Amino acid sequence: MEPADRETATGLPPGIAAAREELTPMLSQYADLCAAHEDALVLFQVGDFYEAFCEAAETVARVCEVTLTERSDSTGDYPMAGIPIDNAAPYLESLLDAGYRVALGDQVEDAEQASGLVDRAVTEVITPGT
């Protein structure tokens, strides 16, 4: 089931989505996961948190009742919201209850061992029916 107010598939505002070559490596990685999972809200592991950016961040903040913050990089300022991984279950339940499919983009290599950008991949897609 799709929520009636579903945001853009990538969760990125048109200006950022149109300027993919100008994105930071991390935001580009997030955009790639969003593009590969257009039917889901992507939560992106950054350390001990799952973060969402742009319109997806606004959804996470609204549905999960968490603070909407802002991240700045070379593309400008954009919304960000996060939930702690060690207490993600109630937040995920709220998103599922609101009708969202959630794709978890986990770090698939040790951040301390990574040379450069930490590799991330969607390791699980959770649906309201699961």
Image: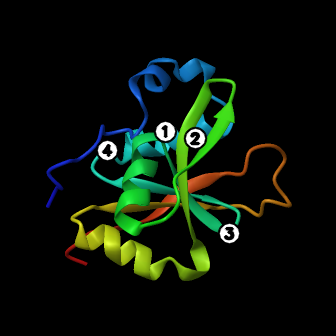
Q: Which mark is residue 19?
A: none
Q: What element carries label 2?
A: helix
Q: Is mark 1 on a helix, strand or loop?
A: helix
Q: Which residue lies under the disc numbered 4?
A: 38
For the N terminus, which image quadrant?
Answer: bottom left
The kind of residue on which mark 2 rests is Gln
Marks 1/3 in contact by CB < 8 Å: the verdict is no
User: Where is residue 56 drawn, in percent x and y?
Assistant: 41, 48
The kind of residue on which mark 1 rests is Asp
Q: How far apart are the two marked residues, 2 and 4, measured between alpha carbons?
A: 14 Å
Q: Which residue lies under the disc numbered 2?
A: 29
Q: How far apart are the two marked residues, 1 and 3, measured between alpha carbons?
A: 21 Å
Q: Which residue is at 81% across, 43% downward?
A: 116
Q: How far apart are the two marked residues, 4 and 1, measured between alpha carbons?
A: 10 Å
Q: Which residue lies under the disc numbered 3?
A: 48
Q: Is residue 89 above or below residue 64?
A: below
Q: In this view, does 126 lie above or below 41?
A: below
The kind of residue on which mark 3 rests is Asp
Q: Which of marks 1 and 3 is nearer the N terminus?
A: 1
Q: In this view, does 3 lie above or below 54?
A: below
Marks 1/2 in contact by CB < 8 Å: the verdict is yes
